[in-house]
Image: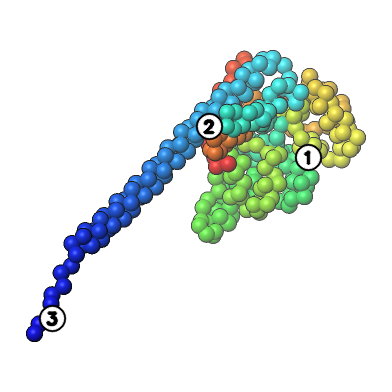
Amino acid sequence: MSPPVRRRDPRGVALILALVVVAIAASVAARMEWRRAVAYEATRHLLSSQQAVLYAISGATFVRKLLEAMPAQGPVTLTQAWAEGLPPLPLPHGRIAGRVIDLEGRFNLNNLITPEGAIDPTEVVVFMRLLSELGLPTDVATNVADWMASPGPASDAQASLYESRDPPYRAAQEPMTSVSELLLVAGVTRAAYLELRPYVSALPSGVPLNVNTAPAPVLAALAPNIPETNLGNIELAQRKGGFNSTSLFASLLGVQTTVPLGVTSNYFRLDLRVHFAGARVRLRALLYRSPEGWTRVLSRRFVSD
């Protein structure tokens, strides 16, 4: 006799199906909510970043106005408003701050060569003294000058030096467009570059050094054996308003210099940071202030903070 056939309770099957449907629906809903949250955060961060960029551009405009507020023909000194930059200011959900550097108060690397592309031995000697002041190898000065000099008898040696590297490259044989180019020059390590960077610039050849804004190592490199007392007096004079002429500076320096000097400046660098609603933006800009007093942004880039 066959055993009785058990019938499945349709209510149990329906319950199981209902639980499966609920589980699938819950999984789909959770995934949709996760995607929505991700999209919301991405949109919020994008909007915050864009707002931070606008704040940075506004900060650059403020600095331009500071530069334009200076007397058109007067000296550029560290006691003027531009030297304070943009002090830390609160923003809704953030802050903004920036500093301005007078690039003409730094040693101009492009002065190592003449407008014709020949090496200027006088400037090379000054650069050697600056390297010595910073505790760096002085032969770097010759390497930097060779990097920029026009093709000549030493070109083949320069070519083989850099072409043997991995990856190979060639010397620029033209003025530098950025001080970061130093990292490509033989003998310049990363550590040496970081040590040297605050004291050098890459401006058009022939731009004189502003003695009102030059830091101590650059001042000390202007001539050999400058008395420490004289350098100290010059730094004190800088903090009190600087010099109206290079003759006043020369009398206080006490020794003769061989490189072009000045008391005005046209090239400035802005380094500005904005923190806004979790977004971080860093703006670096090169500003040119004309002798007539108007200011123009020559280059501008946003870098990771």
> How crowded is the residue under tag 2: few (<14 C-alpha within 10 Å), some, or many (20+)?
many
Along the viewing direction, whichever of 229 and 5 lies nearer the viewer = 5
Per the image, the residue denoted by label 3 is 3
What residue type is disc 3 on? Pro
Residue 88, labelled with which disc? none
1 or 2: mark nearer the eye: 2
> How crowded is the residue under tag 1: few (<14 C-alpha within 10 Å), some, or many (20+)?
some
Along the viewing direction, whichever of 132 and 83 lies nearer the viewer = 83
3 or 2: mark nearer the eye: 3
What residue type is disc 1 on? Pro
Horizontal side of 109 relative to 34 (left or right) equals right
Horizontal side of 161 relative to 1 (left or right) equals right
Secondary structure beneath disc 2? helix
Question: Is residue 50 visible in this depiction of the protein?
Answer: yes
Q: Position of residue 194 (x, y in %)?
A: 67, 47
Along the viewing direction, whichever of 4 and 21 lies nearer the viewer = 4
Q: Position of residue 86 (x, y in %)?
A: 66, 27
Horizontal side of 208 relative to 154 (left or right) equals right
Q: First in sequence: mark 1 or mark 2?
A: 2
Per the image, the residue denoted by label 1 is 217
Q: Residue at x 49, y 34 (%)?
A: 48
What residue type is disc 2 on? Ala
Callout 3 touching callout 2 (CB < 8 Å): no
Q: Residue at x 73, y 42 (%)?
A: 127
Residue 282 in which image quadrant: top right
Per the image, the residue denoted by label 2 is 52
Secondary structure beneath disc 1? helix
1 or 3: mark nearer the eye: 3
Name the image quarter holding the C terminus: top right
Secondary structure beneath disc 3? loop
What is the C-alpha distance between the residues marked 3 and 2?
A: 80 Å
Along the viewing direction, whichever of 15 and 258 lies nearer the viewer = 15
